[in-house]
Structure formats: structure tokens, C-alpha cells
Amino acid sequence: MTPQAWINLAYLAASTLFIVAFKMMSGPRTAVRGNYLGAAGMVIAVVAACFEHNVRDGIMRHGAWPLLLLGAATVVGGGIGATMALRYPMTGMPQMVALLNGFGGAASVFVAAGELWNMGARSAGTTDAGASAPLAPWTQFAIATALTGLIGAITFWGSLVAFAKLEELPRFKKAWTNPNRHAINLGLAITTVLVGWGFITHPDWDILYWLLVVLASVLGCTLTLPIGGADMPVVICLLNSYSGLAAAAAGFVIDNNVLVIAGSLVGASGLILTAIMCQAMNRSLVGVLFGGLGTTTTANADDVYAGKVKSASAEEIAMVLENADRVVIVPGYGLAVAQAQHAVRELANALEKRGITVEYAIHPVAGRMPGHMNVLLAEADIPYEKLREMDDINPTFPETDVAIVIGANDVVNPAARTDPTSPIAGMPILDVDKAKTVVVVKRSLSPGFAGIPNPLFAADNTLMYFADGKKAILDLTAALQQG
């Protein structure tokens, strides 16, 4: 077999591992092994790429320097990635995913730029490869390079804005609500497409590529800035898809099959997940990108809560739990912020020792990214069989004695069912308000990402427990054990 045949065989093995990894990561039982297989596939792909003919030629011309640079980049990048993974809290996982999406887009932009410079140098006859024909318009290379610069730049800067929104940085906490934002975005989009067309027809004009990248960068910011916090789970999925599409386009630029396959897998899975998230929120993708959910408030909190909110202590709630047969725990982002997953497990153990059935209701967009609550509860070794999806558990809430909502807000807001003027009208929610008693653990009556009050907090069957999530659950467990 020729060296290229061995390289192609390695790419095939890596691609197979990627596909199997995606399949295994779709289930919590096999997700860890799926991650290991995906990492192994990436190692194989990177090592195989080091044996490509252009890399070998570079080593022959420049000695060990290319390998030293590659090794240094691997150590630095791997060190940064490992540090982020180990030190970033679980509540920061959505932000970390946003950054990883952005870095993937930026990498694609620079891969395309490097190959463009390399092709231009060859055309000019300034490399050892000798002179070649000038860059031709409307070729795979020209089109793929333009798409890589466009999608990669939008992904990078859009992801940075998403990161800033998820971190609730002061300048990004509020959505950009300029009334002319749609016209601005349309003008930027048209200009970007025209510049892209100009580059495809004149791929030897490098300045057009960089102008395309600059315009796409601005467009990435202006497209993401108006999106409200409630739509962030969908935006993260969409940006994940963009990063995959940018990688696939970069694969066409450098004629790398495994990059095309891996990018296509990420792009397709991101689009599928985006569609699932939109369905879970009863939102169209156009509505997410241009609707601005979470940027306005339609109801006055004083009108909803005034004189109706009932606060309770840990001892009072423990007395209610002692008489329950079935308890459903509803985790939300507040649980993640408080790092209360282990405390929740202790509470569940105390309840189960009394013969009480305990289950967990999981909304598809609870938290700030898909699967956020599943991962959080798995960290506390909570059996996956006890995690019930929304469609499965909603019909059972009328037979639930106590529903304990910890830090969730919009995903349990009955206004989605009862108020057609609400920004979340029609969004599928967990029907906790139908339980016999609802206990809501929150620091305050502050609104969720949608920015609207929650009538559940003032319902007749609701008891509010105002405290930090972890401390509240620990105190509740202690009161239950003393009863």
C-alpha cells in the first residue's frame, strides 16, 4: 500500500470512530465511552494528517521546526483545554461550549487563510513547489474558502457574544433592541454576500477574503446581540452547527476527507438539535433569530404577586413531605448555580427511606443548554431511570403529592398555557401547577431568562422557600430527618 492509502485508511478509521461516538453520546449510559472514542478518533486523524505529503515536504525543507511547532501547539492547546474542562464549574458548561464553538470557527478561518496564502505563493512561483496556474474563479477552492471565511467568522464572533450573554456581563445582559437592527443586519448580509461573490470571481485578491471575514464578524455580533437569554439554548445549538459547517468547508479547501466528514456530522447534529430545541420551546428558528424572546416584559410583577405569595420554612415543608406518597423534583438553572445536586440526592435518599417515591422532571431546555440537568444530576449519581422527560411525566402531575421546583422559572410558568399575550405563549412546560402542593426554592421572585413574572409563585397550592438552593435543600433534609 502507498503512504496515501495508509493515510486514507486512518481517516476512515477516525471517521468511523466519530460516527460511533456520536451514536454513543446520545445516551447517558454510553456517553463517557462515546467521548473516549471520539477523542481517539481525533488523535488518529491528527496523527494521520502529519503524514500528508505537504507536511512531509515542509519537514524536508525546514527540518524539525514544523514538528516542534506542532508539538508546542498541541501542548499549549491541550493544556488550555484541560484546564478549562477541570476548572470551569458545571454552571459554566454552556459558556464553555459557546467558546469551543467559536474557537472551531476561528480555526477554520485561519486554515482557509493559510491555504489561500499557500496557493497564492505557488501561483506566483515563490515556493519550492514551483509556479503553477493562477487561482481560477468559481472553483471548489474559491467557493469553499469564501464559505469557510463567512461561516467561521460568524461562528466565532456570534459565539463570543453568546458567551458574554451567558456570563451575564453588564454590557451584554440586555438584548440589543435597536428598531433598525433588522435593516442593519440585512444590509450587512447583502454586503457580505457581494464581497464573497467578488472573492469567488477573483480569488487571487486576498484583500477580499479578509474584507469578507471582517464583515462576517460584524454580522455575527449583530445577529446574536438582539437574541434574548431565553433563546440561548437554541442559539448554542445553532452555533455548534455553524462550527461544524465551517470545518466541513475548510475540509474542501484543503482536500481533507476526515475534516469534511467530521464537520458534516457536527453540522447535521447541531441542526437536528436546534430543531428539537425549537420544538421544545414551540418556537420557529426565524422567531428565535429575529423575535427577541426575553427582551420585553408584558406583565407587571406587582400585579401578579401582590399579597398572594406564601412563604414557608424548612420545618413546615418537611411536615408536608412526611405525608406524601410521591414527590417530583424539578431541577433548574438555580440548582446548577447553587451546586445543589448532591444535596438533592441526600433529600431523595431521606424521602425514599420513608417509602416515598421520588422522581425528577426534566424539561428539554432547563438550564442553559440541552442536557444540562441530565449531566448535573448524573454527577450526583442519581439513577437515570428516575429522570422523566416532560411528555412522560406531565400526565402524572395531578397524582403528585409534592412537586419541588429548585431554581426553575420559565419552564414551569403556567402563563405559557393561560396567557396568549405572553412572550412564552404556547411553549410546552412542566405542569407542576397541577400537583397537590408545589414547593418553589428560589432566592427571590426575580424573573427567569424570559424576563416575565411567574403566576405559579402566587398560586394557592404553592409554598415559596426563599433561600440559596443548596442550603435550602440541606436544611429541608435535616428537618425531615428530625421529624
Image (cartoon, rainbow, N blue to C red):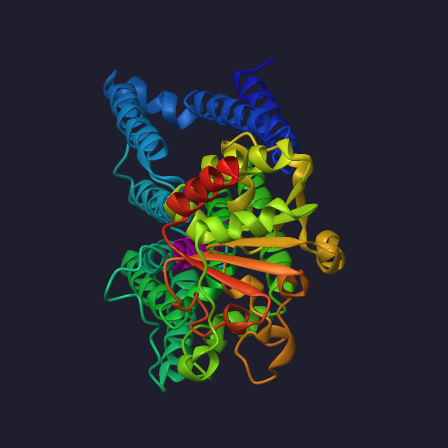
Res 153 seen here: yes
Left or right placement of residue 257 versus residue 98 in this view = right
Res 256 seen here: no
Q: Which residues are magenta?
A: 140-155
Q: Position of residue 1 (x, y in %)?
A: 61, 12
Q: Position of residue 307 (x, y in %)?
A: 44, 79
| Looking at the image, residue 331 lies above or below residue 2 | below
In the rendered image, the residue lying farthest to the top is 1
| Looking at the image, residue 108 lies above or below residue 281 | above
> Relative to the observer, which residue lies in front, 271 or 110?
271
Q: Position of residue 319 (x, y in %)?
A: 56, 49
Q: Position of residue 218 (x, y in %)?
A: 31, 67
Q: Main secondary structure of the magenta part?
A: helix
Task: Judge whether residue 147 is colored magenta.
Answer: yes
Task: Judge whether residue 350 is colored magenta.
Answer: no
> Relative to the observer, which residue lies in front, 464 or 469?
464
